[in-house]
Amino acid sequence: MYKILKAELIADKIYLMDVEAPRIAKYCEPGQFIIAKIDEVGERIPLTICDFDREKGIVTIVFQTVGASTERMAELKEGDFFRDFTGPLGQASEFVKDDLEEVKKRKYLFVAGGVGTAPVYPQVKWMHEHGIDVDVIVGAKTKDLIILEKEMEAVAGNLYVTTDDGSYGRSGMVTAVIEDLVQNQSKKYDVCVAIGPVIMMKFVCLLTKKLELPTIVSMNPIMVDGTGMCGACRITVGDEVKFACVDGPEFDGHLVHFDEAMKRQQMYKTQEGQALLRLREGDTHKGNCK
Ligand code: NAD
Ligand code: FES
C-alpha cells in the first residue's frame, strides 16, 4: 500500500499528489512513469512522474480526470492509499544516459503543452541541477490551465508562457513561440523536447522538421500491463513497431507516426475497435487489451 501524503487540485480537473514510494523515488529518473492502481479491482493507470524526492521517499504525480478511473483517483485524499504503485517504468530520458559533458554542449528547448508540463518539469529540473540553462515554453488553453509555473520558473533558464486565447503570457500556441524564438529572435537549438497532447507533438514536429531541429517526444498511448506483454501501447516509429512502455515513452519525434497513434487511441475506446486492432496487429497485439 502506498500512502498519499498530499492531494491538491492545481487547475480545473488537474490534480497533484505526493505519494510515499521510497523504492521508486530512489531509482526513478526523468522521462520514466509509474502505473497506479486504486484497489484490487481498479484499472491500471499509467502516469508520468512529475517530481521525486529521494531522501524523503516521495514521488509526485499530476493527472487530469478523463474517465471513471481518474475520477475515482481524484476522490482520494491525504492519508488514503494506492493499492499498487508500480515503477519506475520505461526508459529514462536520453540525456540522463548521455555523457554529461556532451549534454552541456547542447542547447535544449523544452516545449510543454497543458498537462504535459508535468513530465517536462523533472527534465528541466535535472538540467538545472547539472548547471545547464535551458529555454522552456509552456502552453495552455487559458490562464487557469497553466500548471507548475512557479516551479518551472525556478529551474528554467528562460521561461516563455503562452495561452491559446491570450489570457496570460503570450498569445497563441506553442508552435508560434518556437517560430518566434528561432526565426525572429535568432535562437539556435540543438535539441527540442516536446511533451503534451499528441496533436501538439505532431505540429511541433512538423515545424521542427522544417527548422531541422531534432525533436524528442514522449508518447502516452493507452497502456495495460506496462511491461511490453499486451501490445496495447504499440506505436510505429520509422518503419519499426515499438512499445511505448518498454522502448519509450520517449522517441524521435520526426519518425513517430502521429496520425496512426491518434487513430489507435480512438479505436481503443470501443470493444469493436479493440477487436479490429487484435485482428490487424496479430502477434504484436497480444489480445489482452480489455
Ligand atoms: P491542450 O489541448 O490544452 O493543449 C496544450 C497546448 O498544446 C495548447 O495550449 C497549445 O499550445 C498546444 N497545442 C495543442 N494543439 C496544438 C496544435 N494543433 N498545434 C500546435 N500546438 C498545439 O492540452 P491538455 O488538455 O492539457 O492535453 C491533455 C492531453 O495531453 C491528454 O490527451 C493527455 O493524454 C496528454 N498528455 C500527454 C502527456 C505525454 O506524456 N505526452 C502527458 C500528460 C498528458
Ligand atoms: Fe505496453 Fe502492454 S502497455 S505492451
Image (tube, grey):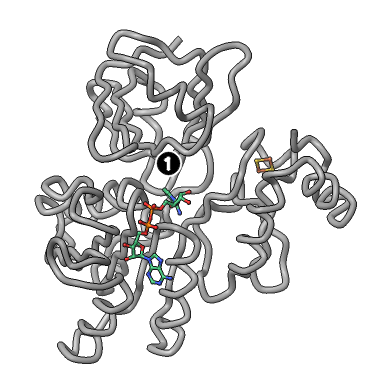
Q: Amino acid at mark 1?
A: Thr
Q: Is residue 150 visible?
A: yes
Q: Residue at x 61, y 44 (%)?
A: 222
Above or below 243: residue 228 = above
Looking at the picture, tell me which residue is in the foreground, 174 or 254: 174
- Residue 93 placement, left or right of 104: right
Kindly identify which residue carries mark 1: 48
Among the 4 quarters of the image, the one containing residue 5: top left
Among the 4 quarters of the image, the one containing residue 21: top left
Q: Residue at x 75, y 33 (%)?
A: 290
Above or below 289: residue 191 = below
Residue 46 percent across, percent down from the top left: 52, 36
Looking at the picture, tell me which residue is in the foreground, 21 or 269: 269
**CB at disc 1 and ligand 1 closer than 8 Å:** yes
Residue 238 percent across, percent down from the top left: 66, 73
Q: Is residue 133 visible?
A: no
Give neighbour class at mark 1: few <14, some 14-19, many 20+ (Cα, 10 Å): many
Looking at the picture, tell me which residue is in the foreground, 164 or 73: 164
- Residue 271 placement, left or right of 122: right
Q: Please count the marks in the image.
A: 1
- Residue 270 placement, left or right of 179: right
Q: Residue at x 71, y 52 (%)?
A: 267
Q: Residue at x 43, y 59 (%)?
A: 94
Residue 16 percent across, percent down from the top left: 29, 32
Residue 246 percent across, percent down from the top left: 61, 46
